[in-house]
Amino acid sequence: MSRRSGHTPQAPVAPTTAGAAAWPAGWTWAAIYLATLLAYLPALGGGFIWDDSGHVTRADLTSVTGLFRIWFEIGATQQYYPLLHSAFWLEHLAWGDSPLGYHLLNVLLHATAAGLFGGLLRRLAVPGAWLAALLFALHPVCVESVAWISEQKNTLSLVLYLGAALAYLRFAADCRGRHYALATGLFILALLTKTVTASLPAALLVVFWWQRGRLDWRRDVLPLLPWFALGAVSGLVTAHFEHELIGAQGADFDLSLAQRCLLAGRVFWFYLGKLAWPAGLIFIYPRWTVDAAQFWQWLFLPGALALLGALLWWRRRSRAPLAAALLFGGALFPVLGFVNVFPFVFSYVADHFQYLASLPVFALAGAGLTALGRRLPPAGRLVAPAGVLATLGTLTWMQCGMYHDLFALYAATLRGNPDCWMAHNNLALALDAADRTEEAVPHLETAIRLKPDFAPAYNNLGYDLLRLGRTVEAVTRLERAVQLQPDYAVAHRNLGLAYLTLGRPADAIPHFEQAVQHAPTDAEAENDLGGALMSLDRVAEALPHFERAVTLNPDSFEFRFTSGRALAQAGRLEAAVLQLESALQLEPDNADAHLNLAIALRQLGRMSEAAPHFMAVERLKPGLLPPR
């Protein structure tokens, strides 16, 4: 930001940044897009990671009805950001499950945000506007937001945020209602994409104070009051969802006010430090122990307050550094520790948390580097910023490799944070998916050692041990999982399967019942419960569970086959024939289904219909038929 002294308003001054600012705006935008695409080229070859499955549109939401659910059914999506998930809905319509389209769009959104940022700074007559935009576009701290598909909430919301800011500045200049309406509409869309954009009205007031040295109630504050109300409602709704639906509650969030103040000071300096020196960037940083008894932890907050005091004193020469600090701290406030957000379970800091907040720091850096550049020889005015940008772009290129796939992501995370229990657990899941179960087990054991109260790790380990034939050990881990989390439906189901494997169906049934109770739409749990009851000859009790499984998933061969076989055993042959015929439509070459259908038809006296199925069994699996 430009230096202003005293409180006398000054007319806007045209930027004098060397290099990019001297180009036509179109060429500058083209340079931003080209530089961003080059820096993020490795990200385009990346796949889906971690919770991308919670953002890329699920099969049950891809229809028009699904789009309606995205907007009006709470819990249909991972977070209530309906505009974001509508964008993902359209993207899925365009390129389905191909990750390239999502990655390319995210890179383009980031470049667009950088261009809008540069345009906004130019409108505010901030020196080094386009340099600041390029610093933002190429800084590696942004990689997590750009290379991770789930964080399209950051890139899309920032485009809308900056668009709203530009439209509001036009309104502030001409007081035309259409500009206010446009700005308000863009602000609402930004809120519906990510709630952190609620900081915009406060940011605009800081900008007006920086420009004029004071605020006018009617001109500056009053028009923004509806925005403050919209932001407050959005923030309360998101906080409620984080607490109730996502799970931002419990012992991991039990911090005193003193601890939260200590955390806030440390978080502030952490983010500022990563912008100044972007070394050691990883996906999940170590989770700090916040301890008020440790003296050194009290140094961060006084340090931040001392910086604020120094900038207050410096405002007599220039309000820009203080304005940048207020904008930075204000945008960071939701993640400083005073509000619970679910990722605090893993770490109190994450690169994507400061995506928006970093803008004022880049603005100040662009202005500062431009001022320093004026002291250099003409050639140095181009070489010095070019060197900085090339270094940042290279670091970004290298950082993108971390997000190529799950194995690269968690391997890099564990190199920088070997005690990250989440990375150990999630790496084990990736290994399981790749049929490398034996390699997964040590990571799950490590996750349990690092976080002994983490029920999913016990469940995952129990399931892996079950797959490896170590059933007795599996039972111990799964019992611990349901002890830690009694409503854990998947763990109850896996424990039931372990008991069935041990030949203890009576012990399995209560756990299958718990699974059905806590996950009433889990067709597999219904089918497993029916199977356990059948093994004890409780056929009449089993039938409703088989029928429920078929109702929940009518396209499952397994559910229709087991239902048909149970119906035949209960003597309901006509119903059994219908289910077995439906099963064969799904798997026409399944010998067991042909055999069961043939037997049911023979019992009904329909030998001419049964004969082709007996012939199919002999063709598909000759040893299955008893000797004649």
Image (cartoon, rainbow, N blue to C red):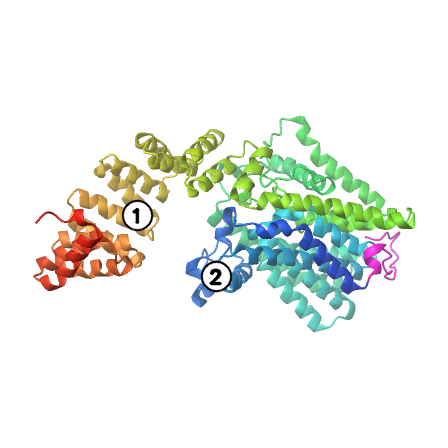
Task: Tell whether 47 sits left or right of 41.
Answer: left
Q: Are marks 1 and 2 in contact (CB under 8 Å)?
A: no
> As shown in the figure, which amino acid type bears the numbered disc 2?
Ile
Residue at image point 50% right, 35% down: 421
Q: Nearer the viewer, residue 443 or 481?
A: 443
Residue 429 lies in the magenta stretch: no
Q: Which residues are magenta?
A: 1-23
Q: Decide if residue 456 is in sight here.
A: yes
Kindly indicate the quadrant of the structure image that contains residue 24.
bottom right
Main secondary structure of the magenta stretch: loop
Task: Tell whether 498 sits left or right of 131.
Answer: left
Which badge, 1 or 2, comes first in the chain's sequence? 2
**Disc number for residue 414:** none
Mark 1 highlights which residue? 525
Residue 467 in the image: x percent, y percent? Answer: 34, 37
**Above or below 133: residue 273:** above
Would you call the spot at circle 1 few (<14 residues within 10 Å), some (14-19), or many (20 or more)?
many
Q: Nearer the viewer, residue 221 or 576?
A: 576
Residue 133 in the image: x percent, y percent? Answer: 75, 54
Q: Decide if residue 126 is in sight here.
A: no
> As shown in the figure, which amino acid type bears the numbered disc 1?
Ala
